[in-house]
Image (cartoon, rainbow, N blue to C red):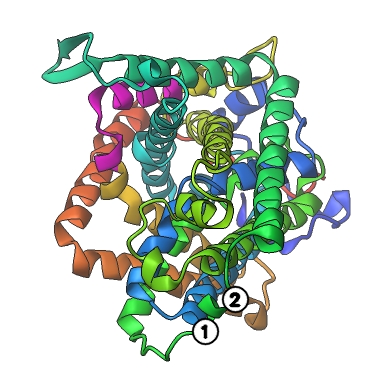
């Protein structure tokens, strides 16, 4: 966006809005198919809920209990994590009001720090952030479904293929996961309406299942309120910070709606209630679930549980309870669906700006979806499934995902310093808290796991020659929407 554009709000008279210089890149963009305005507030909220709530909330509380054994401190930590997620959502809402276009932090980082920074963020989303998470979630769905269909989750190798020095292993498990990935890719390519309805239905079923679990647990379960009271245990500052890392990863995905802001009706007005509303629902779910876990089992017992939700269900309702596994499957299906929607919008935006392979800037003339970008993510996710490398790549690049969102929020300070946004100093308190917390988590990862951080940096840096090659093929358009051009 031209610098002068920030000096005018979306309500500025039409004649006062500056005209942006027309470049070859912007002509290419305007001539291409735009994404359609099809999402409403409820769709954005469902996208956030499905993208956030996954396996983490059923397993992470055990890690938190090991680091912070005091029940009150445990609940407080989840609330702090929720408050930080809300701070990030509020900051992203402000950024989305400046750039209501597809791509999320790719766009925010490109406009604030330069196109290279944005590209590396998008590159991380492609190789790990979305693709790796889709691979991990699809495999987890099949493994949990294996409790009902044992043959489906078999890891017995049918055959393997050596290609370019890599071994792709094919088994019933990997084939079923690949089929699931392709199924959601086809759904979100061929029908925006069916894709939205499926996404919304999965979110509603998930919230309803958690609500039933909580009501049944508190009303008729065999728990005890005495578990909330325990001898005072000192919790060190470092333990708090260490425990906050898995908590924040469990909350990750609160920014999902930002990736589709270009497709949300009246996005400049809608993004704040969508981001804050979706995040608030997740905070409510997480607080209720953690309280239910503590009601069911004491903190000491929680520390040794692999699946805290399963352990709590056994105590509350007796062995053989079948509520948790279906909830996990629904949550994971929702996550695969949500990331199949959100992730490709990043690569689409990169290609449209001329920072990535131009073919991925195309949309389906019939369906209006970024079909090539969806196919790209699906194929890479399947490759990660066959390679079995999604868990390692997620571990190596996890800190970079936190770094990207933290840097995007910190960009509000850069924009204010340049006089490009009318943000008051008092309005920067919330973004400052989020940016500092993100920096602390990244710094802690570098200190505690320097090898993981180094490998992660190398994986991200591998995108630099890709960016240089794409830039050589065509100058990046540096496209930006002027206030009032879209989403209003």
- Say which residue label 2 marks: 225
Say which of 274 and 426 sits in front.
274
Magenta segment boundaries in residue numbering: 376-393
In reply to whether residue 87 is colored magenta, the answer given is no
Residue 78 percent across, percent down from the top left: 52, 69
Judging from the image, what secondary structure is the residue with disc 2 in?
A: helix
Report if residue 486 is visible in the image: no
Q: Quadrant of residue 164?
A: top left
Q: Residue at x 85, y 57 (%)?
A: 12
**Quarter of the picture holding the C terminus:** top right
How far apart marks 2 and 1 lie (CA) works out to: 8 Å
Residue 254 percent across, percent down from the top left: 58, 53
Q: Is residue 1 above or below residue 246?
A: above
Residue 380 is tagged as none
Residue 229 is tagged as 1
Q: Main secondary structure of the magenta part?
A: helix
Residue 76 percent across, percent down from the top left: 53, 77
């Amino acid at each position: 966006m031209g610098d002068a554009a920030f000096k005018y709000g979306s309500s500025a008279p039409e004649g006062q809005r500056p005209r942006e210089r027309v470049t070859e890149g912007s002509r290419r963009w305007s001539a291409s198919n735009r994404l359609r305005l099809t999402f409403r507030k409820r769709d954005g909220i469902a996208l956030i809920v499905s993208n956030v709530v996954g396996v983490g909330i059923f397993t992470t509380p055990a890690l938190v209990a090991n680091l912070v054994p005091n029940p009150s401190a445990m609940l407080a930590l989840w609330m702090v994590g929720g408050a930080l997620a809300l701070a990030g959502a509020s900051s992203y809402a402000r950024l989305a009001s400046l750039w209501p276009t597809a791509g999320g932090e790719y766009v925010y980082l490109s406009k604030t720090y330069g196109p290279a920074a944005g590209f590396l963020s998008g590159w991380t989303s492609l190789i790990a952030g979305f693709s790796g998470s889709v691979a991990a979630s699809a495999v987890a769905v099949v493994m949990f479904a294996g409790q009902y269909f044992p043959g489906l989750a078999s890891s017995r190798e049918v055959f393997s293929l050596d290609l370019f020095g890599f071994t792709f292993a094919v088994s019933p498990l990997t084939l079923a996961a690949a089929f699931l990935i392709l199924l959601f890719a086809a759904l979100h390519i061929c029908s925006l309406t069916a894709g939205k309805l499926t996404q919304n239905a999965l979110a509603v079923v998930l919230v309803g299942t958690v609500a039933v679990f909580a009501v049944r647990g508190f009303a008729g379960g065999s728990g005890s309120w005495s578990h909330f009271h325990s001898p005072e245990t000192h919790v060190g500052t470092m333990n708090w910070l260490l425990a906050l890392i898995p908590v924040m990863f469990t909350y990750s995905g609160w920014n999902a709606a930002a990736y589709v802001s270009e497709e949300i009706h009246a996005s400049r007005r809608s993004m704040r209630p969508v981001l804050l509303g979706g995040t608030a629902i997740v905070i409510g779910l997480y607080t209720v679930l953690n309280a239910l876990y503590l009601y069911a089992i004491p903190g000491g017992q929680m520390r040794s549980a692999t699946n805290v939700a399963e352990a709590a269900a056994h105590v509350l309702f007796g062995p053989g309870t079948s509520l948790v596994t279906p909830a996990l499957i629904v949550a994971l299906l929702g996550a695969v669906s949500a990331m199949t929607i959100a992730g490709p919008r990043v690569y689409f935006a990169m290609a449209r700006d001329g920072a990535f392979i131009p073919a991925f800037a195309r949309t389906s003339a019939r369906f209006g979806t970024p079909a090539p970008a969806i196919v790209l993510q699906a194929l890479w996710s399947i490759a990660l499934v066959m390679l079995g490398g999604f868990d390692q790549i997620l571990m190596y690049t996890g800190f970079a995902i936190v770094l990207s969102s933290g840097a995007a929020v910190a960009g509000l300070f850069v924009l204010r310093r340049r006089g490009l946004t009318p943000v008051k100093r008092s309005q920067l308190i919330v973004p400052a808290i989020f940016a500092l917390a993100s920096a602390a988590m990244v710094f802690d990862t570098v200190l505690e796991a320097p090898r993981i951080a180094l490998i992660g940096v190398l994986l991200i840096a591998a995108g630099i020659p890709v960016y240089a090659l794409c830039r050589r093929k065509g100058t990046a358009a540096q496209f930006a929407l002027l206030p009032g051009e879209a989403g209003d």
